[in-house]
Image (cartoon, helix red, strand yellow):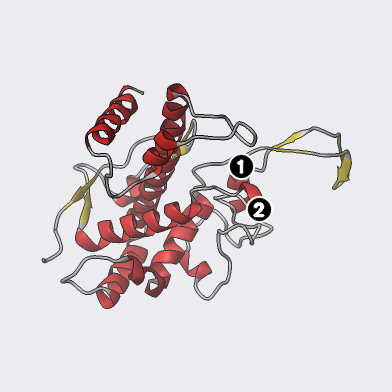
Amino acid sequence: MKVVEGFVRQRTGERKLIKNREGRDFLDALLEYKGDGEDGPDEISAHRRLIIILEMFIAGTETTSGTIEWILAELFRHPESRRKVKEELNRVVGPKRKIEESDIDELPYLQAVIKESMRLHTVLPLLLRRNTLQGTNFMGYDIPKDTQVFINAWAIGRDPDTWEDPLSFKPERFLGSDIDYRGQHFELLPFGSGRRICVGFPLAHRMLHLALASLLHSFDWELGSNSAPETIDMKERVAFTVRKLTPLKAIPKKIIAE
């Protein structure tokens, strides 16, 4: 919270010194907000601004970093998949430039690796709750009106009735498949679906692909001392998100040529 408070104070000071600052962002919009009191508050209090920004930091960093950690762990445990990702990156991007957003559509195996990891390791296991508007009967269960319903996206991704060999890491299952995680295919819902799909999905989608592709393309990776791929602990720690119980220790070894 103190870090966020300091950031807001710094930006407020900058705005006082530079009236027409270029590059306005979300924080500028919060500081400038003036409502009409009808569809929202007249203004956003300083405390509420801090809460909003803190929520964005948590939702935007914890989930992405957790997903990348799971992906790297799986790639260490499956060197053939890691080799295929590296070959695809070298073929599409080459050794002398960095990853750009326009490259992502040309990297189907990288996309398959990300989908498979999010299927197997859904970092937000329970989607945002829903409330039933009326009583209903679903699959023989009576669900009263105003019942809070939570969807277990983690269990959906491991459902043996939907996925063949669901506990195995197999990115190839997504090659040539139209299954995506944008909320239209209910067998894969890491971001939710419908009107309550993750509001940060477009940004998270780009960040995840760019960050992972850059890490794999710019560096060769090795496990820490006294570690081997077959000994990586894949046990889960469940809190706000599902993270590895034992953090992955990986060492970058070679930087891409400039």
Q: In this view, does 179 lie to the left or right of 8?
A: right
Answer above or below: position of 168 versus 177: above
Q: Nearer the viewer, residue 70 or 44?
A: 44
Answer above or below: position of 164 versus 72: below
In the picture, the quarter occupied by the C terminus is bottom left
Residue at 27 percent of width and 44 percent of height: 21
Residue at 44 percent of width and 56 percent of height: 205
Q: Quadrant of residue 49?
A: top left
Q: What element carries label 1?
A: loop
The earlier-in-sequence mark between 2 and 1 is 1
Which mark lies nearer to you, 2 or 1? 2
Q: Which of 108 and 11 is in front in this view?
A: 11
Q: Residues within 10 Å of mark 1 (few under 14, many from 20)?
A: many
Q: Which mark is residue 127?
A: 1
The residue carrying mark 2 is 194
What percent of the width, then of the height, locates residue 181?
55, 59
